[in-house]
Image (spheres, rainbow, N blue to C red):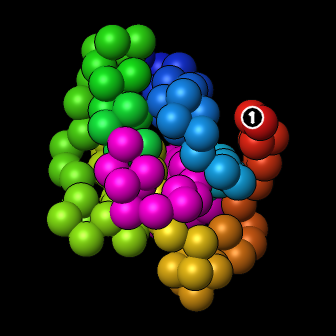
Amino acid sequence: MKGKNELVEAIVAGLQDKKGRDIVVADLTNIPDAVCGYFVICSGGSPLQIQALAHSVGETCRTKVATKPLAVDGLRSAAWVAMDYADVIVHIFLPDLRAFYDIEHLWADADLRNIPNLD
């Protein structure tokens, strides 16, 4: 597998390709006992878009950094899809669920990088 930053950038590119909104990269590398090194969090406007975002991330990571997720959960309901790339976990939410779980603020000690929306 390529470097973590290359993987994070490939994930962001996959999300942007399908117009993922409000992308945040949470760097957890300086937080002791964090479950992984990075979270990449994104919103999709509908279950269909969330499925397309997850598919795009999978394809982009496969072609750009030659890696596949260890697990993908939530594709059936597509309200919250989690993709596990070991040291990077991708969360793709419907906006109301994202606001409810508020993952970015649960990890308030993380270095958060907001990715501008592509319009």
- Of residues 93 and 69, the one drawn nearer to the viewer in this rendering: 93
Please, is residue 5 above or below residue 80 in the view? above
Q: Residues within 10 Å of mark 1 (few under 14, many from 20)?
A: few
State yes or no: residue 100 in magenta: no
Quarter occupied by residue 79: bottom left
Residue under label 1, please give it. Answer: 118
Q: Amino acid at mark 1?
A: Leu
| Residue at 58% over, 87% down | 100
Q: Residue 114, image x and y in percent?
A: 78, 48
Which quadrant, please, contains the C terminus? top right
Which residue is outermost to the bottom?
A: 100
Tell me if 28 is positioned left or right of 108 in this view. left
Quarter occupied by residue 48: bottom left
Which quadrant, please, contains the N terminus? top left
Tell me if 66 is positioned left or right of 12 in this view. left
Q: Residue 94, image x and y in percent?
A: 50, 69
Tell me if 66 is positioned left or right of 15 in this view. left
The answer, for residue 89, to whether it is visible in the render is no
Disc 1 is placed on an element classified as loop
> Count the marks: how many?
1
| Residue at 40% over, 34% down | 57
- Of residues 75 and 38, the one drawn nearer to the viewer in this rendering: 75
Q: Residue 109, image x and y in percent?
A: 74, 68
Please, is residue 18 above or below residue 42 in the view? above
| Residue at 76% over, 42% down | 117
Please, is residue 83 above or below residue 16 in the view? below
- The span shown in magenta is 30-52
State yes or no: residue 41 in magenta: yes
Q: Residue 77, image x and y in percent?
A: 25, 71
The answer, for residue 72, to whether it is visible in the render is yes
- Of residues 11 and 1, the one drawn nearer to the viewer in this rendering: 11
